[in-house]
Amino acid sequence: MSSPQSRIAELAAAIAQHTQRVDDYLTNNGLPHPSFHVDGPDDFELPPELEESRSIILQASQELNDLLQKPKDLLFNHQVRNASNLEDLTAYSREAQLASLPQVHLSIQHREQNTFAR
């Protein structure tokens, strides 16, 4: 008889299985893969069953991350992560507000002509 699989092995297997499903879908449909590159996708247009796989991957990877940390590190990292997320949201909100403002594109020459015309 084999011993039951540990929780971390179960999580790793679930991550691998569901990641393969998402990766296969993206590849087979010619869709861009997740990336931090400037041209990377903003969103994934996954069907509901693959959106569920994506959710399973994220939850399992978070649990695996948590399990493999020491208790003190886990508490510290969650506090840092929460503070960092708040900072990220604040920065994103500022960028979104700036992006929504009308863009003014004046050449230097055009600005100089307007200055001298006054």
Image (tube, grey):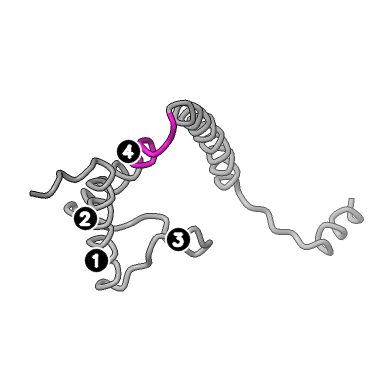
Q: What residue type is labelled 3?
A: Ser
Q: Contact (CB < 8 A) between labels 3 and 2?
A: no
Res 24 → quadrant:
bottom left
Which residue is identified by label 1? 25
For the point 24% across and 53% down, which residue is it? 13
Kind of residue at disc 1: Tyr
Q: What element carries label 4?
A: helix
Kindly indicate whether the residue at mark 1 contacts the one at mark 2 (C-beta within 8 angstroms). yes
> How many C-alpha atoms fall within 10 Å of the one at disc 3: few (<14), some, or many (≥20)?
few
Q: Which of marks 3 and 2 is nearer the N terminus?
A: 3
State the residue at coordinates (22%, 57%). 17
| Measured Cα–Cα span from mark 2 to mark 1 | 8 Å
Q: How far apart are marks 3 and 4 (CA)?
A: 22 Å
Crowding near pointer 2: few (<14 within 10 Å), some, many (20+)?
Answer: some
Report helix, strand or loop for mark 3: loop
Which range is magenta? 62-70
Of callouts 2 and 1, which one flags the residue occurring earlier in the amino acid sequence? 1
Q: Quadrant of residue 4?
A: top left
Secondary structure of the residue carrying tag 1 is: helix
Please state if 23 lies on the left or on the right of 110 as rendered: left
Number of the label disc, if any, that sits on residue 63: 4
Residue ID for mark 2: 50
Q: Residue furthest left?
A: 1
